[in-house]
Image: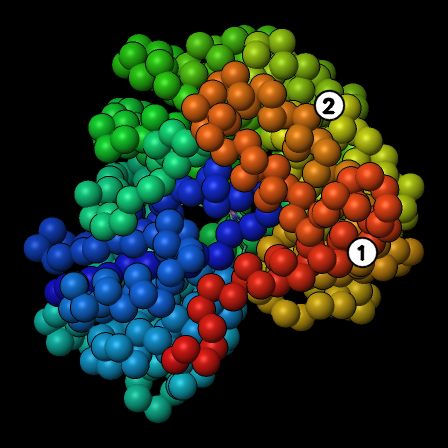
Amino acid sequence: MRILLLSMPDSFEHTPILAVRMPNGALASLAGNVDPHHQVAVADLVVAHDRVRETVTRLVQEHRPDLVGFSVMTFQRRTAHRLARLVHTLVPHAHIVIGGYDPSLATEAYEDPTLGIDFVVRGEGDLTFRALVRALEQGDPVDDIAGLSWHDGQRFRHNADRHVTRLEAETVRPPNRAARVLSGYTFMGRGVDVVETSRGCTYDCSFCAIIEMRGRNFHTFPLERVIDDIRDARARGGNVIFLVDDNITLDVHRFTALCEAIIDAGLNDDEFIVQAMTSAIAQHGTHLAPLMKRAGFRYVFLGIENILDEDLLFLKARAKNAAREHGRIVGNATLAAIDHLHRNGMYVVGGLIVGNPDDTVASILANLAFARRYVDWPYIQHPTPYPRTPMSKEFRERGLIVNERLEEWDGTTAVVKTAHVTAEDVEFLRWRAERWMKVRHLPRAMVHYPRFALRHWRGMLAHTFRGATWRSFVGLEDARATFHRYKAVRARERDYLDEDVL
Ligand code: B12
Ligand code: SF4
């Protein structure tokens, strides 16, 4: 079969397309897991965000797919719907298959017959998609493929869930990066790729979609496979490798062994980015942080979430941010974790969530002040009620959701108000503070990525200060007016595919 797999072009504030264009790990994994005689083309539309319709039209003409698959997050749903209609018009005979977090957790949103969607793959896709492609090729029934929802000509049927895959058993084959047909994946001008070393997490933070997606569990790929995968990513131009594991620091001994394996394999001459738990870094930082540095880690995303205990309680993120001594919780681990990373020359990408139900202006400002003082690159978001997360239920029950336009549920648009602060004020406070925090990091970025910085510093500043004019800089204009202009620019950016082009 000829298969075309697409990821959505929609990106968000903290990963500006000028600087960050990462490939989608799911699609390469799906491509590596169908039977090898199929012809698979993978296209990440983030590298063609400004010419989506032309690119998709060209790709379907060139590849004449029998099946087109989309990977979708919730804030990309509108684009996915428009794209499904476009593909259905261009290649009416092709099966359309949707997967990823949004279709898995809100399957009903893809059942509208006018979208032309035939299948939804729920949860992990590698084995379900392999089985689906086999069944379609052989004309077999699909009603016993676990993890699949399908349109039987009249209505959608939902097969039983699929159990999460034991990655240790090597049933999931390595990704097929050679299937990518677009180029231009970059991080600050350098080639970038993503590598998975494990899947899953055993925590249950209330904002995280992972628990409903796959339950609380943790499975790991053998380290030899991971090293081979990193080599493959490097061979294809990935000088910056983002380890996309849900929670790689859940097993610190394994993470330590991974850092050692990277060094032993001589793969530490380039750069790694990773997301980590503050508690693990704080507790093991004395030996772990120097080792991470030697292994080539530069940016570490820390899920700090919030500095106030009441907020951590709401986010159910206390445990993962706890400092422990002899197994007992003795405080918050955030400062110790940041200190370990900074001492070893790594940068902290500070993940914080402000605008929780009981937040006041003071509690939001306290978090912003913390970010200003301690983190290198702010990654501050607002709580977003993604489908079936525990947090969403509470926001809905308390009537705090004020914006149902899902394309704006991108993490940096406040779509919920707090009991004390309007959604607009929450977002305004973050926006106003965060721009300057980003500017502060630019000189350091210049040292590490001089060519990119010299070529694009103007573009980066223009992106960061979208909506601003000279009047705003000299204080002749109220910051709210600039903020509203920024919001209007942002709204236009989201129209990757006009509805009326179909
Ligand atoms: C890495 C990552 C990122 C990277 C993306 C790098 C990249 N290009 O891949 C970065 C840091 C840039 C990022 C940013 C964002 N992310 Co993110 N991210 C993740 C993370 C940690 C891992 C995703 C991953 O690569 N997994 C490995 C692959 C192999 O697994 P997978 O994607 O789940 O794919 C499997 C299945 O879903 C399925 N599948 C997926 N697509 C398809 C398609 C088809 C056709 C089929 C059949 C199957 C299928 O099969 C795959 C293989 O088993 C997840 C999960 C988590 N626990 O936090 C969040 C997550 C996906 N992100 C999320 C969000 C919200 C965002 C942001 C909007 C805001 C934010 N939180 O930062 C931005 C927007 C990104 C953008 N497009 O601009 C949410 C999505 C929630 C939702 N309901 O939509 C998640 C789940 C985290 C959460 N908060 O709960 N993210
Ligand atoms: S620790 Fe991270 S991956 Fe695990 S539930 Fe919390 S946010 Fe999700």
Rendered image quadrant of residue 350: top right
Closer to the camera, 142 or 31?
31
Q: Position of residue 247 (x, y in %)?
A: 51, 35
Residue at screen point 27% across, 68% down: 57
Residue at screen point 22% across, 28% down: 235
Residue at screen point 85% across, 59% down: 422
| Sequence-earlier tag: 2 or 1 | 2
Distance between mark 2 and mark 1 Cα atoms? 29 Å
Q: Residue furthest left?
A: 37
> Looking at mark 1, is its residue's CB closer than 8 Å to ligand 1?
no
User: Of the residues shown, which amino acid type is indicated by label 1?
Assistant: Ala
State the quadrant of the C terminus.
Answer: bottom left
| Location of residue 204 with respect to 104 vertically, above or below | above
Horizontally, residue 107 falls left or right of residue 458, namely left
The tag on residue 288 is none
User: Of the residues shown, which amino acid type is indicated by label 2?
Assistant: Tyr
| Location of residue 54 with respect to 426 vertically, above or below | below
Rendered image quadrant of residue 330: top right
| Location of residue 299 with respect to 107 vertically, above or below | above
Residue 191 appears in the picture as rendered: yes
Closer to the camera, 166 or 136?
136
Q: Position of residue 421 (x, y in %)?
A: 88, 55
State the quadrant of the N terminus.
Answer: bottom left
Q: Position of residue 273 (x, y in %)?
A: 47, 28
Question: What residue sits right under mark 2 in the picture?
Answer: 374
Horizontally, residue 405 falls left or right of residue 132, namely right
Horizontally, residue 432 falls left or right of residue 227, namely right
The tag on residue 481 is 1
Would you call the spot at circle 2 few (<14 residues within 10 Å), some (14-19), or many (20 or more)? some
